[in-house]
Image: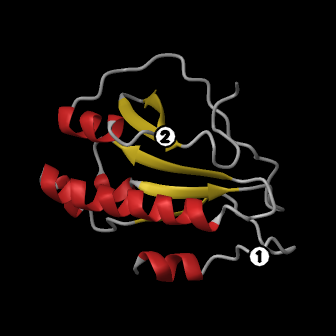
Amino acid sequence: MDTEEIIENLDLTGGPDSWFDMWHTHVDWHGDGNKDWQTRKKYLDGLVDLFKELKIRLTNYPKPFQLWIWILESDSSQDAVYVHSPNPNAHNFPITMDPVNRPEPKYKQLKDYIDGLGLEIIIDNFENELQFYLFDKQTGVPLTKN
């Protein structure tokens, strides 16, 4: 599914049924980006393009929302773009994180790529697995508490 198809399936009207409960999509469904850096970069570029397009489309969304990219250091198939808002399924909005430290990623190419995006970065170390949360503080509700 391409970016336009993904976005066209979202309800961005702001109506009563327009909400997101940790909605997300992946671009590397089969984990092909785990083979080598060039392949991973191609899928990350697609993820960033989707993020940018969603950022544009959500500009006039009338409800509070969060938009972020999630990257799992060791598995390209898990990388995703998320949209989240108040929703009837759970009282889990907003998602907030407290960046305590900034562990160093294992892969320099991934670190350099992420650092070059110009987005806010939260790195979480969960069970010895680095997870990167990338977002724009000027878009929607930030993931940080402050």
Left-right relation of 108 to 117? left
1 or 35, which lies in front?
1
Give the residue number, with chain letter if any, for mark 1.
13
Identify the element where label 1 is drawn. loop
Left-right relation of 20 to 135? right
Amino acid type of the residue that numbered disc 1 sits on in the rendered structure: Thr
Q: Disc 1 vs disc 2: Cβ atoms closer than 8 Å?
A: no
Q: Earlier in the sequence, mark 1 or mark 2?
A: 1
Q: Position of residue 2 (x, y in %)?
A: 40, 79
62 or 47, which lies in front?
62
Q: Which mark is residue 124?
A: none
Give the residue number, with chain letter if any, for mark 2.
133
Q: Position of residue 146 (x, y in %)?
A: 70, 24
Q: What residue appears at the point 71 percent right and 73 percent down from the top-left corner?
A: 12
Amino acid type of the residue that numbered disc 2 sits on in the rendered structure: Tyr
The residues tagged by marks 1 and 2 sit, at their Cα atoms, a distance apart of: 26 Å
Identify the element where label 2 is drawn. strand
